[in-house]
Every structure is written in C-alpha cells, then in structure tokens.
Image: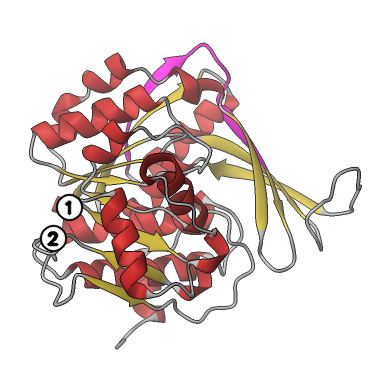
Amino acid sequence: MSSSAARVVVVGSFNVDHVWHSPALPRPGETLQGEYRSGPGGKGFNQVVAAARAGAQTAFVCALGDDAGGALARQLADTDGIDLQDLRSGSPTGTAGIYVDDDGRNCIVIGAGANADLSADFVSARAGAIGGARIVLAQLESPVESVLEAMRLARAAGVRTLLNPAPANAECPRELLAVADVVTPNETEFTTLLSRHAHEEVDADSLVALDDARLHRLCRTLLPRGTVVVTLGAAGCFVSHREDKTRGDARDHYRVAAERVEPIDTTGAGDAFNGALAASMARDAEAPFQAHVRYATRYAALSTEREGAAAAMPAQGDMERRFAGR
C-alpha cells in the first residue's frame, strides 16, 4: 500500500505558540532574560503535521478563530497537504505560552480560545471523513464530548482509534478509554489515569525502573481490552497488549528503547510520537506493532533536535537519511 493511501484523521487543537527560551525555567517571582519566537502548535495540529510529514494522507477536524492565528493554520495545513475541516469560531484562535530551558525541558500554559468551541455536532457532521479513515487520533485539548463522538463514530465504522490522553489534568472519562484501541500516556498521564480509574497510586518518576510484570498488570487494569503505550521520554516506552491482541508481536509486553539524540527542544515530542505512530499504523496494518512503535520513537527523537512544535516535525526523507540501514 502506498503512503498516500494511508488516511489518518486527527481531531484536536490548534494553538499559536509563544515560546521563550532561557537558561532555566522561571521560578515564582523570578524574571529571566531569554529569546522569544512564535509559531504553530497545539497537540492536534502537531500530531496531524507529524502524520502528514511521516507520509500519511491526513485530515484535521478542529475549531479556529477568524483571525491571524486561524489564517496561519489554514495556510500551513495547505502547505502540508492536510484536509482542514475547521469550525469557524467567534472566539480567538487558541494560544500557548511555552518556556524552554537549556536542557530542552519545558513548561506550558494554554489559552483554549476557539478549541473550546469544537462541538460534538460539528464532529458528527464529519462522520464520512472519520469512517473513511484507517486511524482516528485524538487528544484532550478539545471538549471531551467532541473527542468521544469522534472515537465512537470511528469504532462504529470499524476504524482503529488512538487516544493520547494529554494533558494530564484534562478530563478523560472511562467511556472514552473504552472506545480507544490504543492509549498513549506519558508517565504523568498514566499515573493520573491509574489514580482516577483504577485507584492505584504510583509515583510517575518510578515508572522507568518499575518491574515490567507489574507495569504490564497496571496497564491491563487501566485498559483491559486495548493496547497501552507508556512513553518514558529518554528511556523510550513500554508497550502492553491484551494477551490475544498482540498485533504480530511475540510478547504481550515489552520495552522499546529511545534513540540517542542531542535534544535542544522537547516541545511537541509526544505529539511527534503520536502522529508518527498513527501514520505507521495506517500504512501497514499487518506489521508488528513493535515496528510501528520503533518508527514513532525514532521520529519523536529526531523532532527534539529542532526548535518548535509543529515546525519541528521531520519529513519522511529526513527519517530515511538519519536512520538508513537501521
């Protein structure tokens, strides 16, 4: 199957990112000198750009303001060949304030703006696009009822669903987890979901060193019928399948190591992973799931060697040159 036939529909957010780079992250009451830049972001847009540049035919269901930010989104979607299906909102386009330090760490404050106006009715009217996809990917910077509608439509059409339950403080009800085939939390998101839905209290910082058998059990407790991919930053990720749904993998749980890179900005790395994972899954549904995860891990690693969020997403050619023969 050619990559152009691999269709990924992303339902999610677009933000205009305002980014300050300083030697350290600011502490309460502290004023730092730094460098400023602005560019496109939002988890949904980052992920759809990643999927498009990773070779998938893509569509993006979102809400945008009738302002400069909305115009930027429309222009950039056209540049990357993304089928933009946007609700025209009376609210301003979403924004994010991002601080990045010299180690590539970041902290983020988001103003939802138009993203909060994405309605379940608008999503429902995109049932044709969703039902024609191979993968539907969503996050939690949009209203949860709209995300749930997208996932339900996909499930009803036999389309695989991929949920990135981010950010950690967003609402993620049990009904949403129940319609996800694959869930991709980071350490904080995973432990937050465990606390909410499984009454398991686990320290996020301990996950990297946690015994694999116990981590697999926690994943099965959270999502008994689906696959969980816990992203662990520089430590790679942990994959847990239902025993009879290994998707060509020999084992029902395993770790995938991260690639060695020289990160300068980790903003959007999780989004790079999710977009690339969706593109890889859409390209070849019969490939072992571990191969999809390895591709996504490499893609995310490469994105951290560039500044920005959506702008940092590598093209497929960049991936082929960097990881040729590996």
For the point 23% across and 34% down, the residue is 151
As helix, strand or loop, the secondary structure at mark 1 comes to loop
Residue furthest top in the image? 90
**Quadrant assignment, res 93:** top right
Asked if residue 152 lies left or right of residue 265, the reply is left
Q: Which residue is mark 2?
A: 2
Asked if residue 111 lies left or right of residue 49, the reply is right
As helix, strand or loop, the secondary structure at mark 2 comes to loop
Q: Which residue is mark 1?
A: 6
Residue 313 at x, y percent in the picture: 46, 58
In this picture, is 96 found above or below 247?
Answer: above
Asked if residue 88 lies left or right of residue 154, the reply is right
- The mark lying in front, picked from 2 and 1, is 1
Q: Is residue 295 visible?
A: no
In this picture, is 37 found above or below 208?
Answer: above
**Quadrant assignment, res 173:** top left
For the point 34% across and 58% down, the residue is 218
Image quarter where the N terminus lies is bottom left
Q: Is residue 52 magenta?
A: no
